[in-house]
Amino acid sequence: MSKRKSYTTEFKHEAASLVLDQAYSINDACEAMGVGTTAMRRWVTQLKEERHGVTPKGSRAITSDQQKIQDLESQIKKLKREKEILKKASALLISDAYQF
């Protein structure tokens, strides 16, 4: 079984930009970049959405602004989890202190 190809976000951005910014057809861009049409269509759609401010769910963003948003959202989730853990731990410590 062959290994699935993995492309960098820069490569995806460049490939999708051929279609959106330089008026290449999907097929011409696929041929120029050496990728399949399904992947190219997905990247073009994702780049269009990101340019309109939509952060993709379940995949890594193509544009640097959306990547930054994803990183910040991830940090916020992590901090919220840590806050909840600390809240529960302090409540547990306080309840233990009253038992003695």
Image (spheres, rainbow, N blue to C red):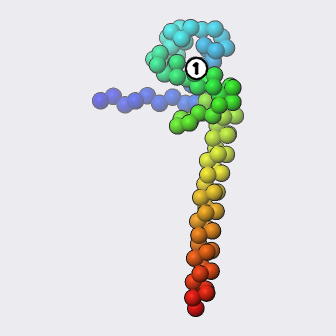
Question: How would you rate the neighbour count of disc 1 (Cα within 10 Å): few for under 14, some for 14-19, many for 20 or more?
Answer: many
- Look at the numbered disc 1 and give the secondary structure of its residue: helix
In the drawing, does residue 32 fall left or right of residue 4? right
**Location of residue 83 by image quarter:** bottom right
The picture places residue 15, in percent across and down from the top left corner, at 58, 19
Given residues 36 and 44, the one toward you in this image is: 44
Instruction: Please indicate, yes or no, whether residue 25 appears anywhere in the rendered image.
Output: yes
The picture places residue 49, in percent across and down from the top left corner, at 63, 25
Report the residue that reaches farthest toward the left: 1
In the drawing, does residue 23 fall left or right of residue 58? right
Q: Give above or below for 72 relative to 31.
A: below
Q: Quadrant of the N terminus?
A: top left
For the point 64% across and 50% down, the residue is: 75
Judging by the rendered image, the residue that carries numbered circle 1 is 44
For the point 65% across and 31% down, the residue is: 54
**Location of residue 57 by image quarter:** top right
